[in-house]
Image (cartoon, helix red, strand yellow):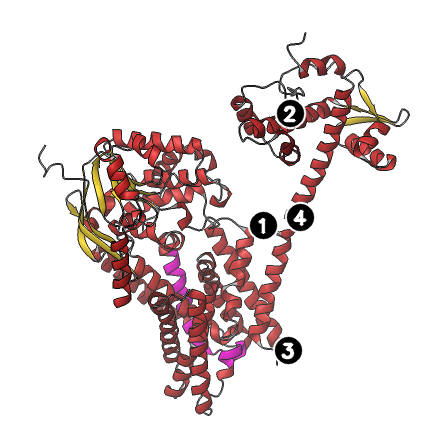
Amino acid sequence: MSKVDHPPALEIHDLSVTYHKKPVLYGVDVEIPQGSLVGVIGPNGAGKSTLIKSVMGVIPSSGGWVKVFGKPLKDSLHRVGYVPQRESVDWDFPVTVMDVALMGTYGKLGLFRRPGKAERKIASEALEKVGMLSYANRQIGNLSGGQQQRVFLARALAQDSDLYFMDEPFVGVDAATEAAIVTLLKDMRERNKTVLVVHHDLQSARDYFDRLILLNMRVVAEGPTPEVFTPELLHKTYGGRLTILSEIADRTAKMS
Amino acid sequence: MMHLLNMEIFQLAQIFQLATTLASGLAELMPSSGTGKAILASILLGASCGMLGCFVVVRRMALMGDAVSHAVLPGVVAGLVWSVDRNPFVIFTLASISGILGAGVVQMLMKTTRLKSDAALGIVLAVFFAAGVVWQSKEKSATAGVLHFLYGNASSIDQNDLLMMLVTSVLIAVVVWLLLRPLLVVSFDAAYAMSLGYPVKFLNALFYTLLSFSVVVALQAVGVILVSAMLITPAATAYLLTDRFKPMLLWSMTFGILSGLAGCWVSMSYNKMSTGSVIALAATAFFALFYFVAPRHGILVKYIRVAKRKSRTHRENLLKEIYSILERKEFARESVSLKSLSERRRQTLEATQKDALILQKYALADYSEENRSLQLSEKGWRRAMEIVRNHRLWELYLTRQADYAEDHVHDDAEKIEHVLGAEIVEMLERDLDFPEVDPHGKPIPRPQSEVVFVEPKKRASQLVNPNKN
């Protein structure tokens, strides 16, 4: 298995991000092999969502580079799927469950081509997989939190990517949906997909993920779950904010 | 990727060129009478503002439309001053540039300060408008007629203005038609749009440009101050009517055109009336109408829904009380007297008789005038048991699973019993391991067990405790 044939699904090198001139991520180095389920964990404000967003190019990074399957992101964008936080959109928006699932197919269609029968079939199958097909014609505002998350997942499935970034998919969902998502994640791993999940619950993190990225403004540790999920490393991640680091961050912000 | 984008821009440019050629051909066919022009103008701007207005409303940037409309004023004044022959193309271009500039300043303020959009819009709206007014008052003679742009006057629209409107409207329609999906995804979820590889910045810039165009086109009919009426109100009305974007576009265009026509007609019949104000009033009249009568989001429907639920709750409470009276007598009797029911409900006999007649009307019970007593029908029995079961299951759930104290659960159950659906009841029963008694020791009825309706007495005792016999 040479590195050329099987490049890592995701390679992040020295990635730094600043928000309003205030550094929020320092020199992140990560290498994720293909076919792994990865949990990104860390305290509030550790930059978990920021990491995903900057890798996706949604927010600009101030340094470092990202490679996806050995190529710059913009060359492998079609192999990447993104599941944003549920709160990031307006659920009163006049679209149906089917409309949202169909959005997953838009990437391959380009700007002008319209979704046809084939795309509708893909979207229906994705909805079926998350148990939301019977809601296809509902406006998305009439759904529960868990159902909304399932719709987002269906959209990602319809995209049929090889690498997924999911931002807090377990927040505010019912137990049934949580179980459904876990099944879905395992199923994705079977098919050699790589999934990065921003997660906030330590207990379940150990059970759900093969690998963990412990994050607190920089990568505290990264690797297979049994190796990384240790009291010392967790304490290092959660044991208070890095006082000096965040103090310096504040000062840099004021200076510029 | 870049190459692809260029191709697409090239395609757009071609389409635009085609539209322009088409429009100049159409100029020959343009109506020559003032009324004809006003009517065509209303249709065009109603349609184009209606279309873009939908995006404006769902993106929650209604004030942006307002800011852009005020921000175009310096451009209009510049056009009137610099173009001696008042070339509408020059005015249009300068006004659009001014509008886009305004939108740009808003974005910049939001990026570089901690001001949110409302404050940024407020600043830009005021300063651009003020600058326009100051400049205009210095150049009074050159800018005669600027009032048409402030308040709108459909009868001032001439052949060239109309042509400009036609070209812009066609352009907007074509772009929206071609890019409906990308524009929709960007509006719904910009981060996701980026992850799809959409040129989000380009799409947003395109949208703001079109928005400025439509505002400028609408100026002569509605005026700077009331452009919102064309941009927001028809789209908002459409949003009351539908939950899908395409129908919303069509409805919004319809309302835009109708209010435009109504405004034109009224303001031309009464010469001095400002077109913009009449259009605004007409658009709002539609909004007001559907605010009340819209099928799903209308106030009337919501009111009826609440009233229906209230009366259903009332009936269900009556059934539940009849059930408890019977239960207290260990189901020895089949009917309850009006008197016992009125005592239990702490109300007069007359009121109770009214309630009895209501139950009779819904075929839930038979009321015997003679004996002044009520006997539940099969339907009434089943519903009564369901409600009592819901109540007791919920109480049990709260005490067992949610650790509520026993004396805290009744009031909550009073509300919940009416809203538990079959699915949740099933889940509750499963979670509670098919319980037989509630926290107060009272048996939980089993309406779902299929028992033939023969003798209420026997049946009830069977149902309440199936293991007894």
So how many labels did they put on this image?
Answer: 4
Residue type at tag 1:
His
On the image, which quarter does residue B460 sit in?
top right
Instruction: Specify whether disc 1 shares its chain with disc 3.
Output: yes
Dot 1 or dot 3: first in sequence order is 3
Helix, strand or loop at mark 3: loop
- Mark 4 = which residue? B303
Q: Which one is in front, B324 or A115? A: B324
Distance of label 1 from label 3 (alpha carbons) = 36 Å
Residue B272 placement (x, y as % from top left):
61, 81
Q: Is residue B29 visible?
A: no
Disc 2 is placed on an element classified as helix
Q: Which residues are magenta?
A: B148-177
Q: Is residue B256 above or below residue A5?
A: below
Is A14 colored magenta in this rendering? no
**Residue B358 vertical placement versus B435 (above, below):** below
Q: Which mark is residue B297?
A: 1
Under tag 1, what secondary structure? loop
Residue B389 marker: 2
Task: Give whichever of discs 2 and 3 has the lower sequence position.
Answer: 3
Q: Pick whichever of labels 1 and 2 is earlier in the sequence.
A: 1
Parent chain of label 2: B
Name the N-terminal-most of marks 3 and 4.
Answer: 3
> Is circle 1 on the same chain as circle 2?
yes
Question: Would you say residue B189 is visible in this rendering?
Answer: yes
Q: Residue at x 25, y 55 (%)?
A: A244
Question: Which residue is under mark 3?
Answer: B270
N-term mark: 4 or 2: 4
Between disc 3 and disc 4, the foreground one is 4
